[in-house]
Image (spheres, rainbow, N blue to C red):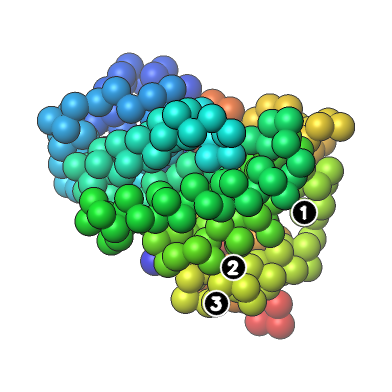
Amino acid sequence: MIRFGPSGNSESFYAAGYSHTEEAASYVKEMGLDCFEYSFGRGVRMTAEKAGAIGRAFAAEGVELSVHAPYFINFANPDDEMAQKSFGYVLDSAKMVRAMGGRRIVFHPAAQGKDAREIAVSRAEDRLKTLRDYIYLNGMEDLMFCPETMGKFAQIGTPEEIVRFCKIDPVFTPCVDFGHVNAREQGSLKTAEDYRRLLGYMIGELGYERMKHFHVHFSKIMYGAKGEIKHLTFADEVYGPSFEPLAEVLHELRLEPYIVSESDGTQAEDALAMKRMYEAAQPRGV
């Protein structure tokens, strides 16, 4: 089943007097949303007890949870000791999402650094093979580990690189951040055909079943010569991308992803806008 929800809490959540993540469960549900992404962006600093409490609150409302692993993960780091920390960040995030009753862990794969692109990508690929081994050793193969497409040229995470990483093992499912792709490619996602081409490529490489329930991040993003600059809201009329043509293609290809809004401060409202666009969309020719 396709799901829509926010990454973290909107400004409106706090304006309404709420403060605890547990309260976000009913807030999101009452808005008509189905999922919520909790960010460990600055580190995994949560007890199993707290994760359990959050999980129970969301389970009671029937809202699915995912987590975003710390932003400073870098599997292309030439320093083995620093790379070892990245394994820990992903696995610690996985422990927390399991305690919350969720299944999905999104993570940024790597930064290029001073190495040639292929050297950095190859190193990240090798490290992700090691991560796969850790996942199986820890009995976490029932979870979905989602390397994310990235928005800056200096980051590892083109759609082709994410496909390459996901071919390592079925434990890896793509997280396609369409705002990142659009920013990196300087405004490449404008029409349904643009989205169809991207998703068709990924389905062709990974297979329909791997892609049917892939992970999505969506927001409008300002970009410049080096790619992503900052996240915007759906009120922006300059940068894009727009969700309507993607909604059409999701219907057409019969894909049912988990869609997370990462708008700047209006993420719940924009998630609801996407849900309404999806419900209103019809495949071409219908």
Numbered disc 3: secondary structure: loop
Measured Cα–Cα span from mark 1 to mark 3: 22 Å
Measured Cα–Cα span from mark 2 to mark 1: 14 Å
Q: Residue at 25% of width from left, 26% of height from top? A: 46
Foreground of the two, 143 or 60: 143
Q: Residue at 74% of width from left, 44% of height from top? A: 117
Q: Is residue 51 left or right of residue 74?
A: left
Q: Which mark is residue 250?
A: 2
Q: Which mark is residue 207?
A: 3
Foreground of the two, 78 or 214: 78
- Amino acid type at circle 2 is Leu
Q: Quadrant of the C terminus?
A: bottom right
Tell me which corner region of the image, top left, top right, bottom left or bottom right, holds residue 252: bottom right
Q: Reply above or below: 271 against 129.
A: above
Q: In the image as oriented, which residue stretches furthest toward the left? A: 49
Numbered disc 1: secondary structure: loop
Q: Which mark is residue 189?
A: 1
- Amino acid type at circle 3 is Gly
